Image (tube, rainbow, N blue to C red):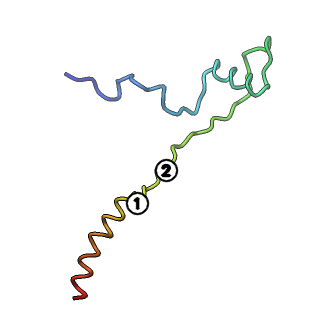
Amino acid sequence: MSIHRSLAFKGKLKRQRNVLTRLERVDKLADEGRWNEGDTIFGLPTTRVVKVRGAKKKKKAPEPEQAEVAEGAEAPAAEEQEK
């Protein structure tokens, strides 16, 4: 019997979350310079969570060698039509 997909834990914390843990917020505030050592961890200011989106993949243009082959394949057919 397999485990239901909603109960699986593999990779759950790798996705984008909109709420950070207290430790993550303290680290982010320290990086921004808004939190100093010795400050209280209660009543922390909110931190902005930026969602990262993947870049769209560009369609690859045919390689020059493939383009020549494709043009070469069309050329004999065009010559036959001219005759």
Identify which residue is drawn at 39% across, 22% down. Answer: 9
Lower sequence index among marks 1 and 2: 2
Give coordinates of residue 78: x percent, y percent.
Answer: 27, 80
Q: Is residue 5 left or right of residue 34?
A: left
Q: CA distance from mark 1 to mark 2?
A: 24 Å
Give coordinates of residue 53: x percent, y percent.
Answer: 54, 43
Quadrant of residue 67 in the image?
Answer: bottom left
In the displayed orientation, state which residue is furthest to the left.
1
Q: Where the N terminus falls, by quadrant?
A: top left
Residue labelled with disc 1: 64
Residue labelled with disc 2: 56
Crowd band around label 1 with a 10 angstrom C-alpha radius: few (<14), some (14–19), many (20+): few
Question: What's the residue type where badge 2 is placed?
Answer: Lys
Quadrant of residue 23 in the image?
Answer: top right
Give coordinates of residue 18: x percent, y percent.
Answer: 57, 33
In the displayed orientation, state which residue is furthest to the top.
38
Q: Where the C terminus falls, by quadrant?
A: bottom left
Identify which residue is drawn at 76% across, 28% down. Answer: 32
Identify which residue is drawn at 24% across, 76% down. Answer: 76
Say which mark, if any, is on residue 8: none
Front residue of this view, candidates 14 and 67? 67
